[in-house]
Amino acid sequence: MGHRIQDILAYLERVAPSAYQEDYDNATLICGDRNAEVKGVLCTLDCTEEVVLEAKAKGANLIVAHHPIVFRGLKSLTGKNYVERTVISAIKNDIAIFAIHTNLDHVAQGVNKRIADRLGLRETKILKPKKQTLSKLVFFVPPKDKEPVLEALFEAGAGQIGEYKDCSFQLEGMGTFTPSENANPHIGQRGIPQYEKEVRVEVILPAHLSGKVIQKMKKAHPYEEVAYYLSALENENQEVGAGMIGQLEEAMDEEAFLDYLKEKMNLQVVKHTTLRRKKVKKVALCGGAGIFLLGDAKRAQADAFVTSDVKYHEFFDAEGQIILCDIGHYESEIFTKDLLAELLSQNFPNIALYLSKVVTNPTSYR
Ligand SMILES: [Zn+2]
């Protein structure tokens, strides 16, 4: 038995948890049977009818796309527009479509890191880290029973801070409890007040994993009733968020930077604000429509901000403080399909993987 579609989705969920997508997004399995066996996977930026036919021709029954073909929902399915025709074609040909969108934008090794790598940026960081994605778990355990509980928590994804794993804080103290007549205590006796030496353990965890982490903690803990506190943190999550910022290896003249940008991102054209006659060293970027990050890029004192879908009046907002570069939505994200194929090939070396060759860019230049 080979891999099921669900195995691929579970792996991609670990890479870019769906909890990190924007509220408006639809990063999910859009059509198809998650229990079907994978015959081949086609990676693409956009999923169109032509891409579905390409998958069919290659014998692939799963399309992993960055942009969700169904974004606002479908109230009927008659083939009256390209979205419906694409979905109908996929269903008729037994091809599943999975979208991994703003969640892949928001992870540290996602879409923006791919752009940063193409531009050779160093010391990259998330430009606008997300808040309210972390929780804190505090629990109490007898010292001799501590290790297996901690192991279970770390295994479930708790205690990870940047490049450090297995992070916890521990303090010994005294716990008290009186088991009821119906209790089945691990330590102590029914109806008798008990003083027990316990360790207070604190760990940080991604909020979306809290259900799983609590379940693992309870399973590994010897007590019938585990005393714990789970609380939401306001901390910024340095690993998750929008855009990226980093440094070029060498400062460049502005014209040289724009030429470099065109070469590295394979652009025919770059639309930009007035040059400032300053060198470019610090570069902020965001694949797709990222103008909402202009303020963050300016505050971080980036010399240039590379994104797409910038409107006329938004170019004024650069205010001579930064060079705002619009490189085109397709051009900014086309390398996402290579990223997806690389991620999948690392974990599923035996699955047939294809990169879409269809040019889905709906705009052109002349
Ligand atoms: Zn996009």
Image (cartoon, rainbow, N blue to C red):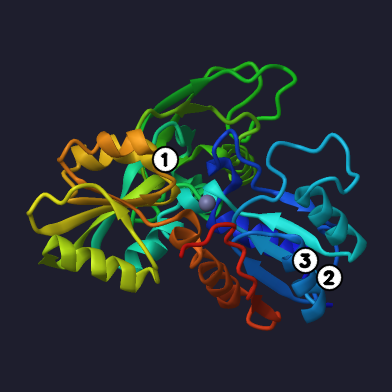
Give whichever of 341, 280 is nearer the camera: 280
Asked if residue 207 lies left or right of residue 159, the reply is: right
Q: Amino acid at mark 2?
A: Glu
Circle 3: element type: helix
Residue 88 position within the rendered picture, expressed as x and y whole percent measured from the top left: 87, 54
Which quarter of the figure has residue 213? Answer: top right
Residue 208 position within the rendered picture, expressed as x and y whole percent measured from the top left: 56, 39
Per the model, the C-alpha gap separating discs 1 and 3 is 42 Å
Which quarter of the figure has residue 355? Answer: bottom right
Whether 162 is drawn above or below 2: the answer is above
Asked if residue 44 lies left or right of residue 237, the reply is: right
Residue 204 position within the rendered picture, expressed as x and y whole percent measured from the top left: 41, 40
**Residue placed at 84% from the left, 77% from the top?**
1
Residue 65 position within the rendered picture, expressed as x and y whole percent measured from the top left: 64, 60
Circle 1: element type: strand
**Residue placed at 77% from the left, 51% from the top?**
82
Mark 2, residues whose alpha carbon is within 10 Å: few (<14), some, or many (≥20)?
Answer: some
Asked if residue 28 lies left or right of residue 270, the reply is: right
Name the residue that disc number 1 marks: 204
Q: Nearer the viewer, mark 2 or mark 3?
A: 3
Mark 3, residues whose alpha carbon is within 10 Å: few (<14), some, or many (≥20)?
Answer: many
Give whichever of 42, 262 is nearer the camera: 262
Q: Amino acid at mark 1?
A: Ile
Name the residue that disc number 3 marks: 52
Give whichever of 343, 184 is nearer the camera: 343
Name the residue that disc number 2 marks: 37
Whether 289 is drawn above or below 235: the answer is below
